[in-house]
Image (spheres, grey):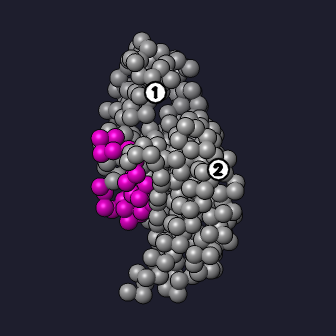
Amino acid sequence: MKAAPFDYVCASNLEHALEVLDANAYDAKLIAGGMSLVPMMAMRLARPALLVDINRLDELKNIRIEADKVIMGAATRQRNVEFDTELHKSLPLVRDGLKWVGHVQTRNRGTIGGSLAHADPSAEMPLAARILDATMRLRSKAGGERTVAASEFFQGPMFTAVGETECLVEIEWPVWQGPGVVTAFEEVAMRNGDFAMASAACQLQIDSSGICQRAAFGLGGVDGTPLAFPDLAQQMIGRKIDENLAKEIAHAAAKRAEPGSDMHADGEFRRHLATVLLSRILASAGQGQRAALAA
């Protein structure tokens, strides 16, 4: 199929883009990489009357690495993050998640902010943002600037807190400081590069004796939004993460998910996948860090 007819504006700067959005509320859609929006338009699942192209706005591609956070422009290419070794030191979970995003061609053009704003519940960047509780900075012509935590940003399948005249301009990623930070990210899909049937990711901080000092983890593809479990993560603090603890936590987390069913798998199978994946990554992350410290 082909997209329905639409008008097109190439924004010259951010203020221009916000002005066009303000004048065309409910009819306009922002586009940067287009890796999610264009296929939806081709299938006529999305029919914006106007596309506002922000792909050329360098002001939305800046990256600032600070001691306790990384500020990332929303139009930053996924490939630029994937191959930035300095960013890997600060955001290892984002690096791990990007390995599962689509294909090379997808990551070459896709943007970090585009994936977050699209809010596919099975996508990798929303899951990473939810686990780390990243902060989204939004801007509009009339309302100015506001920030929204990832815990409130994702509100449903492909539905976020971004208003009709707002643009996601920056993402603030918290950086875990200190030694012993380890991450893991796994998912299951029908084919390499397909949408995940279920995914699990974690970021742990383990001390030299193998005790968990800090933990965050979540599940994707098994609910209307990516899920994080800060209360369950708190139960891991002060303990060694062995297979029994990993299974206990994974089962408790998966019980809270409400996966849907489709032609590929029913909800119960997706919940089972989530349990297995989460148990596996929690155990491997904890054991892998202890092995590294002992080496």
Sequence-wise, the earlier of marks 2 and 1 is 1
Q: Which quadrant would residue 17 be assigned to in this image?
A: top left
Say the numbered circle drawn on residue 268: 2
Q: Residue at x 60, y 56 (%)?
A: 272
Where disc 1 sits, the SS reads helix
10 Å neighbourhood of mark 1: few (<14), some, or many (≥20)?
some
Q: Give the magenta-colored segment's residue range.
A: 83-107
| x and y percentages locating residue 96 in the rendered image | 41, 59
Q: Which quadrant would residue 255 be assigned to in this image?
A: bottom right
Q: Is residue 289 left or right of residue 266?
A: left
| Amino acid at circle 1 | Met
* Quadrant location of the C terminus in the rendered image: bottom left
Q: Do callouts 2 and 1 mark residues in contact (Cβ within 8 Å)? A: no
Say the numbered circle drawn on residue 40: 1
Nearer-the-camera pick, 58 or 215: 215
| x and y percentages locating residue 43 in the rendered image | 45, 23
| Amino acid at circle 2 | Glu
| x and y percentages locating residue 52 in the rendered image | 41, 24
Q: Is residue 179 visible?
A: no
